[in-house]
Image (cartoon, grey):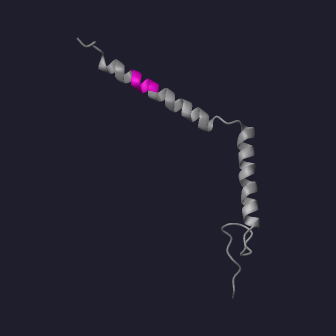
């Protein structure tokens, strides 16, 4: 014969486990130190400057309007 289980208790246990998994993912995604965030931001800015410097159309930055030909 099968073991009798309380469905409410099983549902709550399942939700607790899912919550712990989500919390661990959030800690990994958002748990970086200020120095690590600053380093990532500086690296992204450096890459943007490098890409903008290699543009062939003379524009210095992405999104700048080209010089008008009036």
Instruction: Residue 26 in the image: state x and y as whole percent.
Output: 56, 35
Residue at the bottom extreme? 70
Instruction: Work out whether 9 lies above or below 45.
Output: above
Going 71% across and 49% down the picture, which residue do you hit?
Answer: 41
Instruction: Work out whether 59 lies above or below 8.
Output: below
Left of 28 or right of it: where is 9?
A: left
Left of 65 or right of it: where is 6?
A: left
Going 68% across and 66% down the picture, which residue do you hit?
Answer: 62
The quarter of the image holding the N terminus is top left
> In terms of image quadrants, where is residue 38?
top right
Instruction: Residue 42 in the image: state x and y as whole percent.
Output: 75, 50
Report the predominant secondary structure element of the magenta stretch. Answer: helix
Instruction: Residue 10 in the image: state x and y as whole percent.
Output: 35, 20
Residue at the front extreme? 1
- Confirm whether the magenta stretch covers residue 14: yes
Instruction: Work out whether 38 lies above or below 9.
Output: below
The quarter of the image holding the C terminus is bottom right
- Confirm whether the magenta stretch covers residue 4: no
Question: In this figure, what is the number of numbered marks?
Answer: 0
Going 73% across and 56% down the picture, which residue do you hit?
Answer: 47
Q: What is the magenta range?
A: 13-17
Left of 4 or right of it: where is 31?
A: right
Instruction: Residue 32 in the image: state x and y as whole percent.
Output: 67, 36
């Amino acid at each position: 014969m099968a073991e009798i289980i309380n469905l409410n208790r099983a549902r709550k246990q399942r939700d607790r486990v899912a919550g712990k998994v989500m919390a661990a993912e959030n800690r990994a995604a958002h748990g970086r130190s200020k120095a690590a965030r600053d380093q990532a931001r500086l690296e992204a800015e450096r890459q943007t400057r490098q890409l903008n410097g290699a543009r062939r159309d003379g524009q210095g930055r992405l999104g700048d309007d080209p010089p008008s030909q009036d």
